[in-house]
Structure formats: C-alpha cells, structure tokens
Amino acid sequence: MPSDHENREQPNRTPLEKGLHHSKKALSMTIRIGNALRRIPFIAHFIRAVQRFDDRMGSQFGAAITYFSFLSLIPILMLSFAIAGFVLASNPDLLARLINGIANSISDPSLANTLKNSVDTAVNQRTTVGLTGLAIALYSGMNWVGNLRKAILAQSRDVWERDHEDKEKIHSQYIRDFFSLFGLLFALVVTLSLTSIAGSAQATIVRALGLEGIEWLHPAWTSIGMAISVSANYLLFLWILWILPRHRPERKALFKGTLMAAIGFEVIKYIMTMMLPRLASSPSGAAFGSVIGLMAFFYFFARLTLFCAAWIATAKETKPESLTREK
C-alpha cells in the first residue's frame, strides 16, 4: 500500500507526472516478469538459441541454402526429361498417345507444335540430356550438401571461425561431399519408404478389419500416421544434424533438437499442404504458385535445420565468444 506521504503528494502531481510514474511502474513490472521468465530453463535455452541463430546469420544462410536448393532442381529436371525420353522411346504406343493428347487438348497450333517438338527433343537427345543432367546434378548436389554442412557447422562450433583442422584440400572436400550426398539420398529414400509402407500397411489393416466406418477411431489412425511420419523425419534430421556436419554434440541435446526438427518439419509439410491448393487457385498462383511454394518450403526447411543446430549447440550456457577467443 502507498504510504501517507505518497498519498499527500499524489494529488499535487500533474497528469504528466502521474503518467510517467505509472509508466515507470509498468516498466519495472515488465522487467521483473522478463527476468523471472529468463530463469525458466526452457525459455533461457530458447533465447540463447535465437541469439546464436541471429548472431551467426541464420537467416542469411537459410536464404543461401534456399537458392542452392532451387538451383539444384534444374539438372534434376534435365535428368527427369531424359528418363521420360527413354520411357517414351521404348513405348511407341505411349509416345503416340502423348502426342495425340497434346494435339487434341491444346487449341493453339503453335503451342501444340512447340510441345510436340519438346517431346521429340526429349526422345531423340535423351542420352545427351541425361548424361549432362546427371553430371550437373552430381556437381550441384555436392555443392548443396557442402553448403548445408558449412551452415550447420557455423551454428554448431564453439567459435564461429573455422579452426585450422577444419580446413581440408578441395579434392578431399568433394570426395566427402560426394559420399555425404549419397548418404543423404539413402536417408531420404529410407524415410519416404518407411512413411509409404507404414501408411499402406495401416490402410490395409483398417480395411481388412472393417474398421474404416468407425468414426471415433479416425483420430487414432491420424495420430498413428503422424507418429510414423515424425519418426521417419527424425531419422532424416538425425543424419543431417549429426552425421553430415561431422560434429559430435552432446547426445541428450542432439536427440531433443532432432525431435524438435522432426516435429517442426511435419508442421511445415502440413501447412504447405494446406496453403498450396489455395495459392494455385488464384490467377497469379496458377503461374507462379508452384515456384513460390517450393521456395517457401526450402526456406522454412533451411531455417528449421539451422535453428535446431543452434538449439543443440546452446544446450549448456557457455562463455561469450570474445572471451573464448581471448583465451
């Protein structure tokens, strides 16, 4: 309660003084609440992770990873056209149906001829396009893996600058990135296979037992499918955050950070699944919706990965980097 002296002085205060007094009290209360929240371990850890993510240019690295990810799609598309060319060349009936379908579905003769010529090019030059696409895909894939690894290491190291032992010859680096690329592809194939097989097995079991008509079981099936998908994501991010950077963080922090990444990635996939159909329904979205959605997906994936790397690295409060460098 205010003292008698404060009660006697309060009527003599001007409105400005009263406003300043209340502002000081509100600011003091806000500071006390903020200090109390910072003493909570989870919130203190979250603040340390955000500070490291910002200090070590997490947003800029995320944008760079997005750029390299999108750029790597070009040779993948070239390789896909080459594979389609081999399939069409070995199936003349499928090629004839495709050409007739293009001619019948497009009223503009010039556009139909352009698409027909594209199909003919994909069939006739499939070997050249395929080999070129494969070579460029390997090169861009290794660069993508190398840039992702460096970005994760920038968040994971105790000191941002590279140590002398981190520097290696360029041919050794490309060899490591080559095997890392195939390791990542293997982890991705395993993840997608687990999700697909588990989803198909779940649907088969539900149909075999005749449980598809029971409404109250639908949330349970959804939860089981979500758990399977998160588990598959966990394996993928465990490889990305542990094996790829060749960095050995604390195991408990690694497992927690990987679980956070797996759940966050599932949230990103759900949001993108909900937003892309709405984006594609608009006139501008029909032309650019897939490109915008793909870039947004890569960007959120990169930011999530780097933030979880910062979370793992800040599991324990450490001294500031300036003090570490001075020592």
Image (cartoon, grey):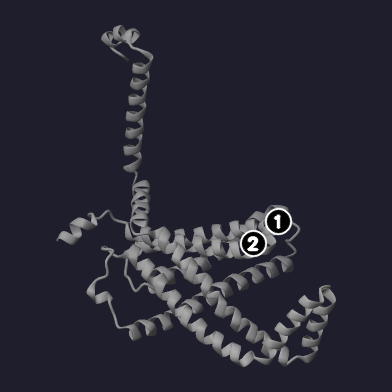
Residue position marked by numbered label 2 in the rendering: 289
Determine whether, in the image, residue 78 is placed left or right of residue 203.
left
C-alpha gap between disc 1 and disc 2: 9 Å
Q: Which kind of residue does numbered mark 2 sit on?
A: Gly
Mark 1 or 2, nearer chain start: 1
Q: Which kind of residue does numbered mark 1 sit on?
A: Ser
Q: Residue furthest front?
A: 110
Q: Position of residue 114 (x, y in %)?
A: 74, 80
**Which mark, residue 282?**
1
Give the vertical position of 78 relative to 238 (above or below).
below
Quadrant, the C terminus: bottom left
Q: Nearer the viewer, residue 178 or 251?
A: 178
Give the vertical position of 208 relative to 77 (above or below).
above
Q: Secondary structure at mark 2?
A: helix
Packing grade of label 2 (10 A; few <14, some 14-19, many >=20) is many
Q: Are marks 1 and 2 in contact (CB under 8 Å)?
A: yes
Residue 5 shows in this picture: yes
Residue 226 lies in quadrant: bottom right
* Residue visible at 34% across and 29% down in the picture: 27
Packing grade of label 1 (10 A; few <14, some 14-19, many >=20) is few
Give the vertical position of 252 relative to 170 (above or below).
above
Q: Nearer the viewer, residue 190 or 119?
A: 119
Q: Position of residue 192 (x, y in %)?
A: 57, 73
Q: Nearer the viewer, residue 47 or 187?
A: 47
Quadrant, the N terminus: top left
Residue 284 lies in quadrant: bottom right
Q: Position of residue 50 (x, y in %)?
A: 37, 52
* Residue visible at 36% across and 49% down in the picture: 47
Determine whether, in the image, residue 59 is placed left or right of residue 298.
left
